[in-house]
Image (cartoon, rainbow, N blue to C red):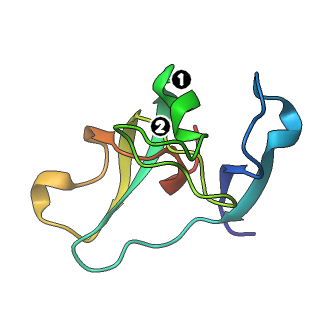
Amino acid sequence: MPEMNLQVLLRRRPQGAPVPGDFEITETPVPQPAEGEVLVRARFLSLDPYMRGRMSDAKSYAQPVQLGAVMEGQTVGEVVASRAPPASRPAIRCWAASAGSASPA
């Protein structure tokens, strides 16, 4: 059985406080990195107030998350596979931009 990637998708734009129905939790197979890429397993996810603004399509300093897309957030992760230069070999800790790009620990 392939390793799975847990994702939180934005299903609808919250009206007031977000509720569970605004999101969908799904699993997809973990992709293998292409040439020049690394695969990062998220270890810690930062849940920041700015994420609320990303759920809205109102004008903001940050791009809104599209409906049906993975909720994005800053993570601290571990490189678990690499097809990039040796400086990014597995087991090096790094910052990753999106929580939707690697399986949680």
Q: Are marks 2 and 1 in contact (CB under 8 Å)?
A: yes
Residue that badge 2 annotates: 73
Residue at 27%, 38% (x, y): give it: 94
Q: Is residue 96 left or right of residue 43?
A: left
Residue at 41%, 34% (x, y): give it: 74
Residue at 59%, 58% (x, y): give it: 66
Quarter occupied by the N terminus? bottom right
Q: At numbered mark 1, what does the secondary structure look like: helix, strand or loop?
A: loop
Amino acid at dot 1: Leu
Disc number placed over residue 47 in the picture, else none: 1
The front one of 82 and 27 is 27
Picture quadrant where residue 56 is located: top right
The front one of 25 and 32 is 25
Q: Is residue 90 left or right of residue 12?
A: left
Amino acid at dot 2: Gly
Residue at 58%, 37% (x, y): give it: 105
Q: Is residue 5 left or right of residue 87?
A: right
